[in-house]
């Protein structure tokens, strides 16, 4: 078997696993805790700390690199994730145990992400497998926030709104899926990759100093972090609570199908534009599109439409704008020196934006989104701070 075909056997499933576990931690947990009776503010507060392992990654990652091989970290964390999902299902009636296990899931997912990325980077990787990797992660998000949530909703109908039983079945299904992936990767992941050192990047722009980029890394996605968490709760909350009252099945369709299409197309469009004109030339336009999600949800919070087609179109526009605007952030993040520390700054932004959403949700959804719209001006401000370092990004991308 050739090197490339060998990688093709495990790259899609590995990054599908990475995406599924991440979406359970960051999105399905919101729906779960809200349906189990936590207030919107409390749900956001608890889920905010799921970002803590990623925020602290720059400190614990060196121990992961030294303790054992990436392959063994992948195998062990996948088995433990399957066991943790089964434990959540078994202990679901205890809110304390459920939240504690979600935090354990977040830690295991963060470790798995580090190991998966490290294992993938070892050896030479053809460009088409990088595309496969990203598409596998997107597909995992579609399955997680689409089919798994829809499955929970269908079970709630089947078992006459028995929320606990429906979520127990959903988490047992997730545990079974992770167990299957564990056995697959045990068999398919090579004991060691063909080349033990990471290949050098060819013709990459000069790295941007971390200190010069901290303001950009923290503030550019901050408002969208508020909208991203609050919008999930807004879509599923009843109209009397200020939400749109979508059923789990409707939410799964809107976010897991329509939203993912918009996010993927927006991201590809942004990446294509950057490849052609360079990040510096696109940054102002992309930073302005980061205002669109908050603007859309402010309108939805004021209007509260009930037509699923209207809601779907709004979510499509939201995710299209977000995917397009966030492409610039990912491009610049990829060229910052001290990459892991830069990612920790991004995770800190997500954590604090989620806590901000929690505080704002003590009022109502309209006020939350209106405040997020005002805070969206931080994205153009962040773009302005990075512009003077644009010389590092003026050249079109080399295709990585």
Image (cartoon, grey):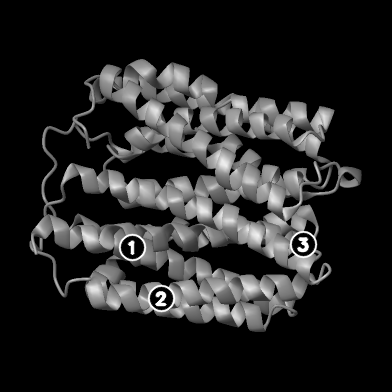
- For the residue pair 271 and 145, the one nearer the viewer reads as 145
Residue at (44, 71) in percent of width and height? 108
Label 3 to label 1: alpha-carbon separation: 30 Å
Say whether marks 2 and 1 touch (CB < 8 Å).
no
Left or right of 337 on screen, residue 152: right
Residue lying farthest to the front in this orientation: 158
Q: Which residue lies at the image location 33% right of the left edge and 34% below the top edge?
A: 331
The residue tagged with tag 1: helix, strand or loop? helix
Q: Is residue 313 above or below residue 86?
A: above
How busy is the neighbourhood of tag 3: few (under 14 within 10 Å), some, or many (20 plus)?
A: some
Q: Considering only vertical position in the picture, is 55 above or below 302? A: below
Quadrant where the C terminus sits is: top left
Q: Is residue 234 left or right of residue 21?
A: right
Q: Label 1: how many residues lie within 10 Å, few (<14), some (14-19) or many (20+)?
A: many
Any part of residue 371 in sight: no
Instruction: Please provide percent x and percent y for residue 229.
Output: 64, 47
Q: Nearer the viewer, mark 2 or mark 1?
A: 2
In this figure, which residue is indicated by the disc labeled 3? 35
Q: Quadrant of the N terminus?
A: bottom left
């Amino acid at each position: 078997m050739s090197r490339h075909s060998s990688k093709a056997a495990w790259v899609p499933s590995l990054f599908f696993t990475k995406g599924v576990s991440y979406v359970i931690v960051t999105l399905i947990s919101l729906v779960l805790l809200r349906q189990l009776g936590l207030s919107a503010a409390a749900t956001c507060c608890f889920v905010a700390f799921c970002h803590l392992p990623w925020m602290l990654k720059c400190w614990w990652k060196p121990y992961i690199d030294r303790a054992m091989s990436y392959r063994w970290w992948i195998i062990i964390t996948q088995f433990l994730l399957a066991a943790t999902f089964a434990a959540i299902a078994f202990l679901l009636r205890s809110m304390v145990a459920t939240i504690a296990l979600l935090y354990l899931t977040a830690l295991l997912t963060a470790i798995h992400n580090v190991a998966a990325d490290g294992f993938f980077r070892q050896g030479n990787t053809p460009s088409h497998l990088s595309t496969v990797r990203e598409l596998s992660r997107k597909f995992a998000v579609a399955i997680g926030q689409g089919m798994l949530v829809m499955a929970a909703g269908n079970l709630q109908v089947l078992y006459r709104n028995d929320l606990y039983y429906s979520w127990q079945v959903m988490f047992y299904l997730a545990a079974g899926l992770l167990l299957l992936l564990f056995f697959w990767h045990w068999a398919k992941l090579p004991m060691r990759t063909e080349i033990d050192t990471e290949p050098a990047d060819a013709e990459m722009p000069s790295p941007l100093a971390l200190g010069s980029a901290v303001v950009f890394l923290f503030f550019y996605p901050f408002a969208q972090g508020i909208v991203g968490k609050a919008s999930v709760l807004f879509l599923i909350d009843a109209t009397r609570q200020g939400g749109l009252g979508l059923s789990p099945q409707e939410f799964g369709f809107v976010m897991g199908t329509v939203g993912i299409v918009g996010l993927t197309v927006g991201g590809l469009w942004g990446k294509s534009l950057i490849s052609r004109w360079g990040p510096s030339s696109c940054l102002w336009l992309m930073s302005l599109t980061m205002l669109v999600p908050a603007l859309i949800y402010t309108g939805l919070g004021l209007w509260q439409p009930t037509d699923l087609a209207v809601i779907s179109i709004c979510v499509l526009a939201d995710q299209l704008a977000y995917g397009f605007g966030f492409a610039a952030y990912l491009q610049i993040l990829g060229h910052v020196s001290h990459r892991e520390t830069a990612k920790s700054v991004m995770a800190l932004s997500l954590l604090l934006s989620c806590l901000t959403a929690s505080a704002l949700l003590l009022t109502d959804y309209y006020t939350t989104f209106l405040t997020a719209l005002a805070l969206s001006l931080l994205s153009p401000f962040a773009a302005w701070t990075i512009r003077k370092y644009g010389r590092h990004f003026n050249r079109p991308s080399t295709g990585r």
